[in-house]
Image (cartoon, grey):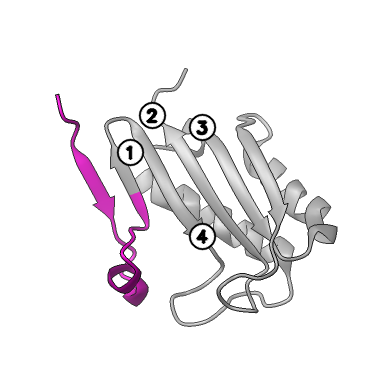
Amino acid sequence: MKMKRENLSSGAQWEAHVGYSRAVKIGNTIEVSGTVATDGNSVLFPGDAEQQTKFILNKIKTTLESLGASLADVIRTRMYVVNIEEWEQIGSVHGDFFKNIRPATTMVEVSRLIDPGYLVEIEASAIIDAD
């Protein structure tokens, strides 16, 4: 039996151009695309990895909720950072959101993200009712 696929759009102009969705839900699985600190027009909190991380994780939370899930359903996060020296600040914010959930996670340093103002990009995978 084929499961229903639901693509969630953020309305960003790049989605159609690049061919991606904000998130995809198939059955009880949700994959959230790489998320950065933007309002759709500009980089938010330039130079502040901690505030970018807070914004990103709240954006992921909202995305999950719109698909019937919550942060408690997250089983994996992937964090891409441009300066691994900021790992403690970024990790501390991640811990504020996930200290009781404790998904599998990865944090890696990358040479750059799509805009030089982005310091952090985060992806999330969730399975609804994953207890």
Give the foreground label among 4 and 3: 4
Counting residues from the start of the chain, the first of labels 2 and 1 encountered is 1
User: Is 80 included in the stretch rendered in magenta?
Assistant: no
Q: Nearer the viewer, residue 7 or 54?
A: 7
Marks 1 and 4, how far apart at CA: 19 Å
Give the foreground label among 2 and 4: 4
Q: Secondary structure at mark 1?
A: loop
Q: Residue at x 33, y 68 (%)?
A: 15
**Dividing the picture into quarters, in which one does residue 96 lie?**
top right
Residue 1 image point, x, y percent? 14, 24
Q: Which residue position holds label 2?
A: 128
Instruction: Tell me whether circle 4 and circle 3 mark residues in contact (CB < 8 Å).
Output: no
Marks 4 and 3, how far apart at CA: 18 Å
Q: Which residue position holds label 4?
A: 35
Marks 2 and 4, how far apart at CA: 20 Å
Residue 95 image point, x, y percent? 71, 41
Marks 1 and 3, how far apart at CA: 12 Å
User: Is 16 included in the stretch rendered in magenta?
Assistant: yes
Residue 35 image point, x, y percent? 51, 60
Residue 18 image point, x, y percent? 35, 69
Counting residues from the start of the chain, the first of labels 2 and 4 encountered is 4
Give the foreground label among 1 and 4: 4
Q: Which residue position holds label 3?
A: 72
Instruction: Tell me whether circle 2 and circle 1 mark residues in contact (CB < 8 Å).
Output: yes
Give the foreground label among 2 and 1: 2
Counting residues from the start of the chain, the first of labels 2 and 3 encountered is 3
The amino acid type found where label 1 is placed reads Gly
Q: Secondary structure at mark 2?
A: loop
The amino acid type found where label 3 is placed reads Ala
Q: Residue at x 75, y 48 (%)?
A: 91
Q: Which residues are magenta?
A: 1-23
